[in-house]
Image (cartoon, rainbow, N blue to C red):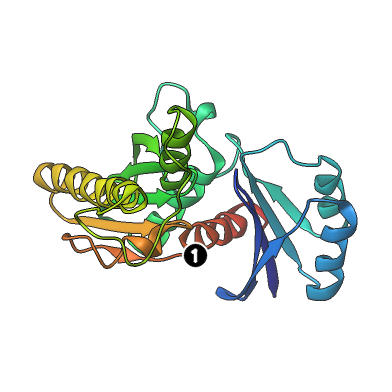
Amino acid sequence: MTTLCFDFGNTRKKAAVFTGDQMSEEIFLEDDATDSIDELITKYQPAKTILSSVIDHNPAIEILLAQKTRFHKLSAATKINFTTPVGKPETIGADRLALVAAAVHFYPHKNNLIIALGSCITYNFVNQDHAFIGGSISPGMDMRFRSMHEYTAKLPLEAASWNYPLIGYDTRTNLQSGVLYGLTCEIDGITGLYEEKFNNFNVVLTGGNSSYFAGQLKNKIFADHHFLFKGLYALSELNNC
């Protein structure tokens, strides 16, 4: 059985193809037009679909997916495999729900911290009793580069590099060092604070920019670029019975 999982984030629109419980393909979408989504349905013939969206997407695609598949839209009403003892559970982002669902599914009965590096960095903590306690949000890598450019008169807009130095030797490398080493130290520092507080502790690093940091971090961290998609699949199985 094939499942299509859609993830519409602030930066990209993506989909993943699952055959059974194994992810077989990742697809980057240029738009959310109904014709584009219909082409995917025709090509992969999914029995089930699920959508996680943090943007104002084209509402017509929900009608299309519901007509042609067993469809579920991730929301506060979604049946989940954890509890949410927070003040306003309806305010939890769809992407964060999927990440926590994946942690509970793949690392049950552990204190899990899921760090997602996208437009923003989200730190998402679910305890060993499968209660999503909360976490924190900070500016993402691209946002930090952009803010230094937009809020100063002369600093250029830079981007990440694989060969960034600790000690910058010009404007470009100073900016790269500040953002990339700054983020590395932030992640290590926050992870360390959680580790001091909780035993039976596990950390997962995911998101579009995670590859820049996975090898730099001091703490033992599982890097899984497709973790959100795995969470969407698990939630599809719960909600598309």
Task: Using the image as rendered, state which of residue 61 and residue 225 is in the foreground.
Answer: 225
Picture coordinates of residue 163 (x, y %)? 32, 67
Point out the image quarter for the N terminus: bottom right
Say which residue appears at 39% left-offset and 62% top-offset. Answer: 161
| Extreme residue in the left direction | 196
Query: Could you say whether the residue bearing mark 1 is in a helix, strand or loop?
Result: loop
| Residue designated by label 1 | 226
Say which residue appears at 21% left-offset and 43% top-offset. Answer: 190
Whether residue 6 appears in this view of the structure is no
The answer to whether residue 101 is left or right of residue 127 is right
Say which residue appears at 72% left-offset and 60% top-offset. Answer: 29
The answer to whether residue 58 is left or right of residue 106 is right
Picture coordinates of residue 104 (x, y %)? 38, 55
Q: How many numbered discs, if any? A: 1
The answer to whether residue 65 is left or right of residue 121 is right
The amino acid on which the numbered mark 1 sits, given as a three-letter code, is His
Point out the image quarter for the C terminus: bottom right
Q: Quadrant of residue 124?
A: top left
Say which residue appears at 81% left-offset and 40% top-offset. Answer: 59
Q: Residues within 10 Å of mark 1 (few under 14, many from 20)?
A: some
Picture coordinates of residue 186 (x, y %)? 24, 44
Image vertical order of residue 123 relative to residue 151, above or below: below
Picture coordinates of residue 19 (x, y %)? 64, 77
